[in-house]
Image (cartoon, rainbow, N blue to C red):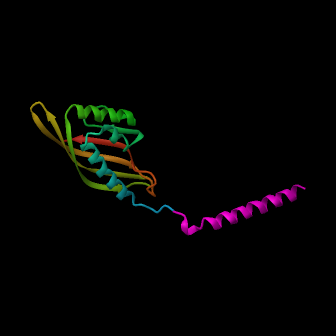
Amino acid sequence: MLTLLNNQFFKLTASFFLLFSSYVSASQQIWPTFQDPVAQVRSASTAFQSTFNQKDADGLGVFYAKTATLKLDQSLPAHYRSNIVEAWRAGFEQGVEHLQLEIIEIKRTGFRKVVEAGNYVLTINTPNGPIEQTGTYTVGWRVHPFGVKPPKIIFDFVNAN
């Protein structure tokens, strides 16, 4: 009796599969395609700069992983996305005005890891007028090889000249 039930279950499952697979053909299915991680990071970096120049601290938070670290020159590191957002918000309130990034290198360092390095110019408004701070930055990104999820910053280190 048990063999008969197993056989009927198998036939029912097989017929359902055949019926369903003919309804959704392979040509109609959308399969993710590989996306170049370096290109993903280049695009995300440009979007980060644009969001920064809009002084959108909450918008910058979208770029960071939940457990990311931001280390600005001569300051304590900010760990976790919420603290990073508050750090950027405080910077905007203290006169940080405009960011210009010059990407020197974007290099894939692992299956899901990309490192971006470059120079920056940061304009800061002070009581004595605007000043420009220059320096270097290194950003570690976590990427999805198929671009299903946007790249996320896992570390962001900034060194002023």
Horizontal side, residue 72 vs residue 66: left or right: left
Above or below, 25 against 4 in this view is below
Residue lying farthest to the front in this orientation: 23
Whole-percent x and y of residue 121?
A: 19, 45
Q: Measured from the top left, where is residue 33 in percent x and y?
A: 46, 63
Instruction: State whether residue 74 appears in this view.
Output: no
Q: Hey, which residue is sitting farthest bottom in the picture?
A: 27
Q: Residue at x 33, y 47 (%)?
A: 139
Quadrant the C terminus occupies: top left
Residue nearest the observer in this picture, 51 or 161 = 51
**What residue appears at the point 23 percent right and 31 percent down from the top-left corner?**
93
In the visual, does 5 lie left or right of 142?
Answer: right
Magenta residues, start to end:
1-30
Can residue 13 be seen from the camera position used here?
yes
- What residue is drawn where x is 29% and y is 33%? 89
Residue 82 lies within the magenta run: no
Q: Quadrant of residue 147?
A: bottom left
Between 31 and 65, the one lying in front of the other is: 31
